[in-house]
Amino acid sequence: MTLADWHHQAGSLPPAEQQRAAQAGADVAGGQVHIAAASAGQHALDLAVASFLQGFELALLLAGAILAAAGVVGFLGLRHLQSPASQQRQRTDVRTSR
């Protein structure tokens, strides 16, 4: 996502800087926006930061969704699980109620 946005943003740079911007895509994706701006031109710094932050935000949202799904699966899977002590207690309760 970060690279796609960077290549889209780099299209708005002057033609002389577009080629260097295309080569700096890995730096942008890795968060090295100052290195990308140094190689593609200082005009590219804001574009590189915006592209990186968009990809980072998407990664955080995806991680949050995965974490929430894992919590639901864990809750649903573990709520039926009983410890041996509670199973013994339950058997004792059933016997004494008869």
Image: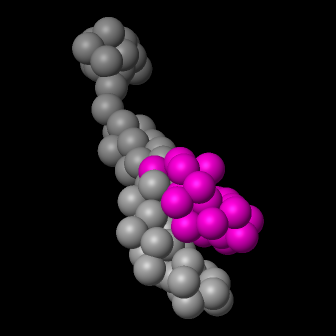
* 42 within the magenta span: yes
Q: Hey, which quadrant is residue 15 in on the image? A: bottom right
**Which residue appears farthest toward the front when viewing the image?**
16
Q: Is residue 37 above or below residue 67?
A: below
Residue 21 is situated, as x and y percent measured from the top left of the image, at 50, 72
* Magenta stretch, residue numbers: 30-55
Instruction: Specify the color scheme.
Output: one colour
Q: Residue at x 54, y 83 (%)?
A: 16
Horizontal arrangement in the rendering, residue 14 relative to residue 6 (left or right): right
Tell me, yes or no, if residue 61 can be seen here.
no
Q: Is residue 16 above or below residue 93?
A: below
Q: Residue at x 54, y 50 (%)?
A: 35
- Residue in the picture at 63% in, 84% down: 13
- Which quarter of the image is occupied by the C terminus? top left
Magenta stretch: includes residue 81: no
Q: Nearer the viewer, residue 30 or 98?
A: 30
Magenta stretch, overall SS: helix
- 71 is higher (above) or lower (below) than 57: above
User: Residue 37's x, y, as percent?
Assistant: 61, 59
Q: How many marks?
A: 0
What residue appears at the point 45 percent right and 55 percent down from the top-left corner? 27
Q: Where is residue 39 shown, x and y percent of the image? A: 52, 60
When the figure is inspected, residue 22 is found, relative to residue 60, above or below; the finding is: below
User: Which image quarter: residue 84?
Assistant: top left
Res 20 visible: yes
Q: Is residue 76 left or right of 63 when viewed as pictured?
A: left
In the image, 46 versus 81, the foreground residue is 46
